[in-house]
Image (tube, rainbow, N blue to C red):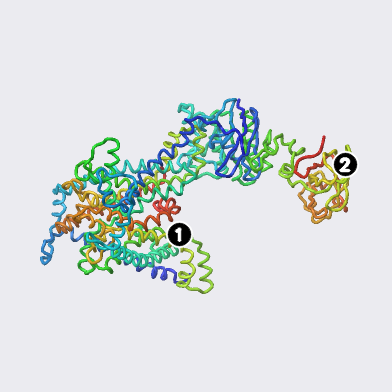
Amino acid sequence: MSGTATRYSVGYRIRQMWPWLIIGPVLAFCLFPVYWIILTAFRPRTAIFQDPVSLLPRDLTLDNIKYVWFGSENNEPVTHFLGTSLLVSIIASIAALILGVSCAYAMGRFKIGGKFLPMWILSFRYVPAIALIVPLWMIGKRLRLLDTYQGLILIYALFSIPLIVWLLLGYVEAAPKEVEEAAYVDGAGHWRTYLFVALPVLAPGIAIAAVFTFIGIWNEYVLAYQLAGNKVTTITVYLPRLRTAIALLFGEIAAASLLAVIPGIFFAAIMQRFLVRGLAFGGLK
Amino acid sequence: MRGSKRFAWTLATPAILGLIAVSIVPFIWMLISAFQKFSPNPKIPATFNGLDNLWALFEDPQFVNSIGLTAFIGVILFVIQLTMGFAIAWALYHIRRGRAIIVSLILIPTAIAPLIAGLAWWMLFSTKYGAVNSILGMFGIDQVQWIVEMPWALVAIIVASVWHGTPFTAIILLGGLTTIPPDVLDASRVDGASARRQLLYVVLPLMKPFFLVAGLFLIIGLVGLFEMPQAITQGGPGNETVVQGMYLFKLAFNFYDLGRSSMMSLLLVIFLSIVGTLFYRLMNRKEA
Amino acid sequence: MSNVLLKGIRKSFGNVEALKGIDLDVPDGKFVVFVGPSGCGKTTLMRIVAGLESQSAGDVMIDGKVVNELSPSDRGVAMVFQSYALYPHLSVRQNLRFPLRMGNVAAAEADARVAAVAETLQITPLLDRRPSQLSGGQKQRVAIGRTIVRDRKLFLFDEPLSNLDADLRVEMRLEIQKLHRRLGATMIYVTHDQVEAMTLADIIVIMRDGQIEQIGSPIDLYDRPATKFVASFLGSPKINLLSAEVTKVESAAFEAKMASGETARIGLPVGAQVGATITIAVRPEDLSPTEGDVSFPMTLDILENLGSTMLAHGTSGAERLTMEYRRSGGAAGKIGSHVRVQSGSLKIFGPDGNDIVTR
């Protein structure tokens, strides 16, 4: 369709573009470090240690990835630590989901514990792990749980419950009660109603909670560093050790970092739609 | 439904017991340890020493410095992250096409583990081989001794923290903006409000609760601030960038002063409860 | 004094073209209603006039001045929104004062004006409440109050009554009419409700698929719809549409074979060829059991008693036919196999839906 396009002045057009004048630089700031990590991960040593260093991708190589994956004279294979992270994250997430989903359902549907119980559980969000690390370490030592898989998994599973409850409580309250009541009237009983009627309805919310829990554990450092770290070493604890080697291992650190951030970035991309509303409303509760 | 309450408690009890195990139990442990003197020799039992740990902390210049430094970083992060976060949210709000993809991209820093983010910035700020000096060099600026010199080490930590935290703030605020009915914003424009006055008189007042949420998360993040300075400066140069979280670690696990570090943890928990209570008060206030 | 001139307005959202070239002159002081089915572009057009949306092509002129680049705050318009759009964080008083504050009106004068407007709209007791404490009708009054508190020359209403229940709607409709008479300002009003359009408008602009279908006074459009779309959009109960094939054309009359199989002779000159498929449109109230020079067969299905009038629903051939007639006429008993109508009250549309009567 033709027609006389409205003749807007240059000034007006620029004023209409103002959001991009903010978003453009912000995007550059947000993404440049990511670009740098990727670039460094695929660069040969000679390109990384140039002074001044070049910003453009040239002479790319898979060497660093190979070194960290299979190990080299400078470092152990990263697969071992990725494996530990994966194992701990998955088992702890599953355990946390079993406990957290049940708790959220019980609170959201049957209103147990009045106002106090949800308040108490949600108040955990105000306490970062670091505030409790000293007594946790002392207790862990007493119980001989330090530097064990079961100890780390246990602490992660329990620390993840509040997040799951926080994410799911709204879902439970919004889910139609009538479906469950119908199942109950049909003679399903509490357990079967919960397992076969309520849980499928909550599945989307549970999926979101599962992703957040997994990423939270995968990315965690403080607990993994202090409550484990020798026999049980996750990827985040291993990474800074690469720095203390005799040589500067920028390429190896970048390559290992890249492998370690893939799950987080992947899930962030999927969850984008949910995040905007979820974070804002979750915070209001 | 009959027996509902009993069933509900059966479901919730394991989680509640677990949470007690990682909250009330450590809290009581901490409460006791905070008033005890621990010997470096684990064979010798701890002894009650009253408020000595508290007084010792107040007289400890490193403790006072770490708190001061964290508060200083906090003020700067508050100003930068809330203004930048809101600017990003407000800009994103006005972008219709491509918003979803931009949000995904902007969120990438937040999805990266803080420790890895710190390591990335450690490399970026490397004096000889870092991209930051390389870019500055293009503008004819001499190499800056990031990480090794003050105040640059602190600047590096703040830049990295802003990079990691601002997207999160922006997304909370964007979520808040989407709760304002678009008609209300249109109405204010038609009613004669310029863009600036619309922000001042309509948008910002309606965003108050969301700024509170964002501020709360900032404070919690500040108390938990550890990975970023650990990865970038390890507290250096000297002890110049030892934030409160790092000092707690040092106290407990380098100096093995479990009494004093427990007291410090106790102070943190008290501080957080005050902040939390204040937050609830402000949120639930009916007017404003 | 305020007239609005739209020249070749187009608007695209991505690949969707919402407005396909609108030319319109809204004369000073008139009440103009944009009406059409949802998605026809009427709200978009109003938002372009307000400056809330920028057009892709064409010019918007207010009082002879091109305002394409003026922000809404500089166009000197007032607008009532479908959702009322009251400021939730401000009291009713502060809501009413808001436009004055933005216009830098002195506090004392602002107080006086707010009081006067509140008095006119009978919302004085509500002044210290919050919008969340008001009913729908009260919100609507505040929203209107907010637009009239400043001396604006151009008022825009975006479906302002659609969230109200039926009684309130009638009441507010009258209020808006009074308002127009009192202020004498130019008003543009968007609605999908043809009753609102008929009762309020000096000029109705009927829109369809991003284009103007017809412009005219309510009576013009009702009596002389230019297209089949306009004919069927206005009027309740809906106009009857009967398809037919032209069999004979004379200078002042034509004959057509109806879908029912019968041939009708209609005393109107038409511009059509023999064999053309046409639509004969007849308003239910123009049909009569007994009077008229044209007759259509009708099989009666059901009689509805509306009190003063009766509605007879039936079929003619396979097509639905509704007749509205006065009960007091005693005609109920006389409905036979045919209903009648005067040729002059029929509307004839060609295959493309346009009026083909050559008057």
Q: Position of residue A168 (x, y in %)?
A: 42, 60
Q: Is the residue C71 above or below the residue A167 in the image?
A: above
Q: Tag 1, which chain? A: A
Q: Position of residue C284 (x, y in %)?
A: 79, 46
Local secondary structure at mark 2 = strand
Q: Residues within 10 Å of mark 1 (few under 14, many from 20)?
A: many
Q: Is residue A191 left or right of residue B264?
A: right
Q: Is residue A181 visible?
A: yes
Q: Position of residue C157 (x, y in %)?
A: 59, 37
Give the residue number, with chain letter if any, for mark 2. Answer: C249
Q: As drawn, which residue projects farthest toward the front?
A: A59
Q: Residues within 10 Å of mark 2 (few under 14, many from 20)?
A: some
- Tell me what residue is drawn at x 25 percent, y 62 percent: A76
Quadrant the C terminus of chain B occupies: top left
Q: Nearer the viewer, residue A53 or C112?
A: A53
* Amino acid type, label 1: Tyr
Q: Nearer the viewer, residue B106 or C67?
A: B106
Determine if marks 1 and 2 fall on one subunit.
Answer: no
* Amino acid type, label 2: Val
The total number of labels drawn is 2
Give the residue number, with chain letter if any, for mark 1. Answer: A171
Q: Tag 2, which chain? A: C
Whole-Å distance between the Cαs marked 1 and 2?
A: 70 Å
Q: Nearer the viewer, mark 1 or mark 2?
A: 2
Q: Picture quarter containing residue A55?
A: top left
- Mark 1 vs 2: CB contact within 8 A: no
Q: Is residue B58 left or right of residue B178?
A: left
- Tell me what residue is drawn at x 30 percent, y 60 percent: A66
Q: Picture quarter containing residue C148?
A: top right
- Tell me what residue is drawn at x 40 percent, y 60 percent: A209
